Amino acid sequence: MTDAPSPSRLSPAGLLALLAAFAAVQALVLHLMGQPWICTCGVVRFWTGVVLGPENSQQLTDWYTFSHVLHGMIFYGATRLVLPRLPLLAALAIALGLEVSWELLENSPPVIARYREQALAQGYSGDSVLNSVSDTVAMTIGFVAARLLPVRATVAIGLAFEIFTAVMIRDNLTLNVIQLIHPVEAIAAWQGGVTASPHP
């Protein structure tokens, strides 16, 4: 007789099944909202590095993928802190629910219009389904990484991501949240100096 899986462990099968279920719902709803399956350029790329280019938020990964990995680390820490006895698969389900909900909200007309007020998102028209689902995968990677790594290593990686993207594109998760909730003119002016990523 095999032992039941520990509530503090994530089985690969359970993780993949949960991710696939949420991603399928996310993809369907985004499609019904009118978002394109892939970049309207007709090409699928693993990475696009031109932050003001038309393929940003359209390909598999971009500069904002780092922020979504950070989402997963934050969601893991928050669920472990607030609900320490919660089975890990249930904690991941909460994290996926939050991430997918945000992805759908982010692609709603009011939030798209709000983003367009920012210096780095003036031409933003929402994510492709491919990019949005990839963001959810990135969040899951961050969640799992936070589960496996020591707390100090997780915090160090998160800070490194924030500093790295701030230096490279003058944006990161922190600045994105600030500018979305309560825009600061000084930040907008600084970000306005970006024309393109140095690594397209």
Image: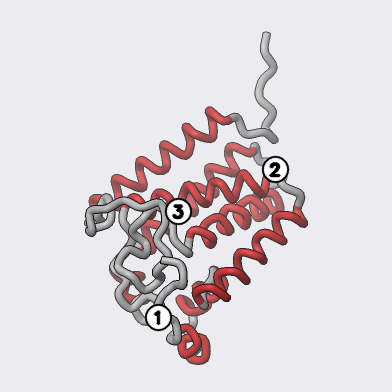
Residue at image mark 3? 135
Residue at image mark 2? 148
Q: Amino acid at mark 1?
A: Thr
Whole-percent x, y for residue 8 in the image: 69, 35
Residue 115 quadrant:
bottom left
Q: Residues within 10 Å of mark 2 (few under 14, many from 20)?
A: few
Residue at image mark 1? 195
- In this figure, what is the number of numbered marks? 3
Q: Residue furthest top?
A: 1
Q: Residues within 10 Å of mark 1 (few under 14, many from 20)?
A: few
Whole-percent x, y for residue 118 in the image: 40, 80
Left or right, residue 2 beside residue 24: right
Tell me which numbered mark, 1 or 3, is placed earlier along the sequence: 3
Q: Is residue 19 above or below residue 36?
A: above
Q: Amino acid at mark 2?
A: Leu
**How far apart are the two marked residues, 2 and 1, measured between alpha carbons?**
38 Å
Q: Is residue 170 above or below residue 199?
A: below
Cβ–Cβ under 8 Å for marks 2 and 1: no
Tell me which numbered mark, 2 or 3, is placed earlier along the sequence: 3
